[in-house]
Image: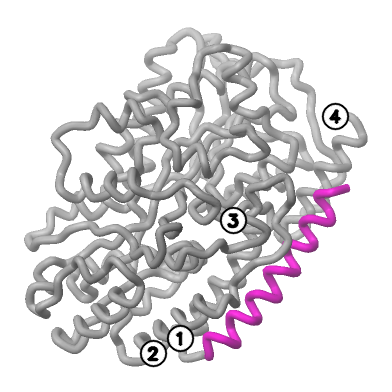
């Protein structure tokens, strides 16, 4: 790697607020091609999929390997949660022992792009002429386009939705259609608690929900324009008055016991919903598989997130796949691309949706879906009706992974009785410091 490229990479890497790893060099020889005993090109693939989605991903890997016997072997290895995986990835820069293929979360996209380590997926498609990104669902293309180019293959795309206990709503005399606005959601949560004595809502303390609540209000989460233009995002909008007011209401509902405090454990939130100790769970569409597999003996449904304005809507989450150029041979890159386009195919995207609740990334896959459950239909209705704009593009900055920690901590503090305004102001200062540091280093 040329010195100038190495310097930029190290600046971007150290701009991400992860403990220092003493990075002093990057790059390794890409002359050797890793092969197994059968002579197949081996692609080291790091991922963070677990549970139902992890089982499906492994089945996809096995299918690809079977269909490409004698050519390629995708060696998939679970690296822990997204935060753990990206930490290991950054640490590996110093040794040059990077995977040829990396699954990164939605919020890690800008960092992966800025690092210069990956080959843009759209470039690979143009070079090989064998994948049409124009068939991506518009909201997916909207999220994953950066600088007029798609850098990764959307793999498992999600949106947050509301999982609803229909029987609890009936007992409380509430029509689920009231959940269409944020005010209606909060009123339903309070009424459910008053009527049943149990929590009306649960969600775990992931900063993703703060971002999505801003989108529910119809507001961008960072400026300018959620970092979607050539001008980098320079500040967050965590202390936006509307968002603070919403969290003031949430704070009061926590104190009343109307919102279940799941802490940072998503499984605890799902457990509260499945055990009927919370009537609503705000959770990823990717959680559908786990709820469906529970074979509940009571009626439940899925509803779209509230939308307070025409511009409001749920920003996509989930993950995408990146071909790593640094330290990998051309043969590995070609093999990785073959797997990427396999994952992005209509057939596999349909499989992912059927088995997990992650949403199909292509319009052809959506059109091919049949025999859908009512809950799956609801997932797709929100997906298809989400407006394509800067609000639903989500905040694009390489500092997002670090900044999210600040408002995740604020969520926990608020659940434990702290003042929402003060907590969000502190989170704003911390997040803005992170984005300023990131932009300074990334511009070198």
The kind of secondary structure element at disc 4 is loop
Q: Which mark is residue 415?
A: none
Q: Distance between the residues labelled 1 and 4?
A: 51 Å
Would you name the residue on which mark 3 appears?
Answer: 395
Q: Nearer the viewer, mark 4 or mark 2?
A: 2
Who's the residue at 92% across and 34% down the image? 3
Q: Where is residue 142 in the image (x, y as percent from the top left)?
A: 52, 41
Tell me, for residue 1, which label it has, or none: 4
Start and end of the magenta stretch?
A: 419-444
Q: Which of marks 3 and 1 is nearer the N terminus?
A: 1
| Up/down of 269 relative to 126, above or below | below
Prevailing secondary structure of the magenta residues? helix
**Mark 4–mark 2 distance (CA, rounded to whole Å):** 55 Å
Front position among marks 3 and 4: 3
Q: How crowded is mark 2: few (under 14 residues within 10 Å), some or many (20 or more)?
A: some
**Residue visible at 51% across and 18% down in the picture:** 338
Q: Name the residue under label 1.
A: 248
């Amino acid at each position: 790697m040329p010195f100038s490229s190495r310097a930029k990479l190290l600046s971007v890497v150290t701009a991400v607020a992860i403990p220092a790893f003493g990075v002093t060099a990057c790059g390794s020889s890409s002359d050797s091609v890793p092969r197994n005993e059968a002579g197949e090109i081996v692609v080291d693939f790091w991922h963070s999929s677990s549970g139902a989605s992890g089982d499906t991903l492994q089945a996809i890997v096995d299918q690809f390997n079977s269909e490409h016997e004698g050519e390629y072997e995708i060696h998939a290895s679970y690296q822990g949660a997204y935060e753990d995986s990206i930490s290991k990835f950054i640490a590996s820069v110093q040794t040059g022992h990077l995977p040829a293929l990396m699954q990164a979360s939605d919020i890690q996209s800008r960092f992966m792009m800025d690092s210069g380590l990956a080959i843009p997926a759209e470039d690979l498609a143009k070079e090989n002429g064998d994948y049409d990104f124009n068939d991506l669902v518009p909201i997916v293309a909207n999220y994953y386009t950066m600088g007029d180019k798609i850098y990764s293959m959307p793999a498992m795309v999600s949106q947050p939705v509301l999982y609803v206990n229909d029987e609890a709503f009936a007992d409380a005399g509430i029509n689920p259609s009231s959940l269409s606005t944020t005010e209606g959601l909060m009123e339903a949560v309070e009424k459910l608690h008053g009527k049943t004595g149990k929590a009306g809502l649960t969600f775990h303390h992931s900063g993703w929900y703060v971002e999505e609540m801003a989108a529910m209000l119809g507001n961008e989460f960072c400026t300018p324009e959620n970092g979607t233009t050539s001008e980098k995002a320079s500040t967050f909008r965590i202390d936006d008055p509307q968002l603070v007011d919403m969290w003031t209401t949430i704070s009061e509902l926590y104190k009343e016991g109307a919102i279940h405090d799941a802490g940072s454990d998503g499984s605890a939130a799902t457990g509260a919903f499945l055990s009927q100790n919370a009537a609503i769970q705000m959770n990823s569409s990717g959680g559908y598989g786990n709820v469906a597999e529970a074979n509940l003996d009571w009626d439940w449904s899925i509803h779209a997130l509230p939308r307070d304005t025409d511009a409001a809507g749920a920003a996509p989450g989930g993950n995408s796949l990146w071909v790593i150029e640094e330290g990998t041979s051309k043969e590995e890159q070609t093999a990785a691309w073959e797997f990427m386009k396999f994952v992005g195919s209509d057939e596999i995207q349909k499989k992912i949706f059927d088995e997990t609740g992650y949403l199909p990334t292509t319009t052809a896959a959506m059109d091919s879906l049949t025999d859908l459950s009512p809950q799956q239909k609801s997932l797709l209705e929100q997906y298809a009706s989400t407006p394509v704009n800067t609000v639903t593009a989500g905040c694009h900055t390489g500092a997002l992974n670090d900044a999210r920690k600040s408002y995740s901590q604020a969520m926990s503090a608020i659940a434990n009785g702290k003042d929402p305004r003060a907590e969000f102001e502190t989170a704003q200062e911390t997040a803005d410091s992170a984005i300023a540091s990131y932009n300074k280093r990334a511009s070198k």
